[in-house]
Image (cartoon, rainbow, N blue to C red):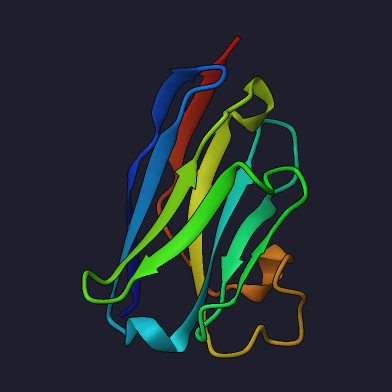
Amino acid sequence: QVNLVQSGGGSVQTGGSLRLACVPSGYIFSTYNMAWLRQAPGKAREVVATIDSRGSLNYADTVKGRFTISKDNPRNTLYLQMNSLKPEDSAMYYCAAVYRSYRGHSPFSPDAYTYWGQGTQVTVSS
């Protein structure tokens, strides 16, 4: 049984920072590709940052330079550091994971991932 438990998030003003955390259980952390996704009301779920099992990072253009995805292998924790937040960053954020391959999908497709966290709300006020 694979579980992803998220923490962090909350409300912040424009320009502020937040950090999200995701703790997986039930698998070997270092063998999975992981990502952070978000979904705003009325919008499709989008991948904002990915980190593969080798540690390679990628970001959506909308968050590049402001968000940082990282893994702490000894602590078995995935992070998303979000700086210079904007109102358009407001959304429900999810961590996600898939074992080794992206199952024929782009890493930036939500369909690439098989395991999901419970979601955490991020609200940025102007």
Front position in the image: 52 or 112: 52
Residue furthest left as drawn: 75
Q: Residue at x 51, y 78 (%)?
A: 55
Q: Is residue 66 above or below residue 50?
A: above
Q: Residue at x 40, y 51 (%)?
A: 118
Q: Residue at x 22, y 76 (%)?
A: 74
Please state if 105 lies on the left or on the right of 6 as rendered. Answer: right
Residue furthest top as drawn: 126
Front position in the image: 70 or 99: 70
- In which quarter of the view is residue 62 placed? top right
Q: Is residue 29 above or below residue 96?
A: below
Q: Residue at x 69, y 27 (%)?
A: 88
Quadrant that contains the C terminus: top right
Q: Is residue 73 above or below residue 19?
A: below
Quadrant that contains the N terminus: bottom left
Can you give x and y, in whole percent of width and height, for residue 67 in the image? 57, 46
Front position in the image: 115 or 63: 63
Can you give x and y, in whole percent of width and height, for residue 105 in the image? 76, 79
Q: Is residue 124 above or below residue 97?
A: above
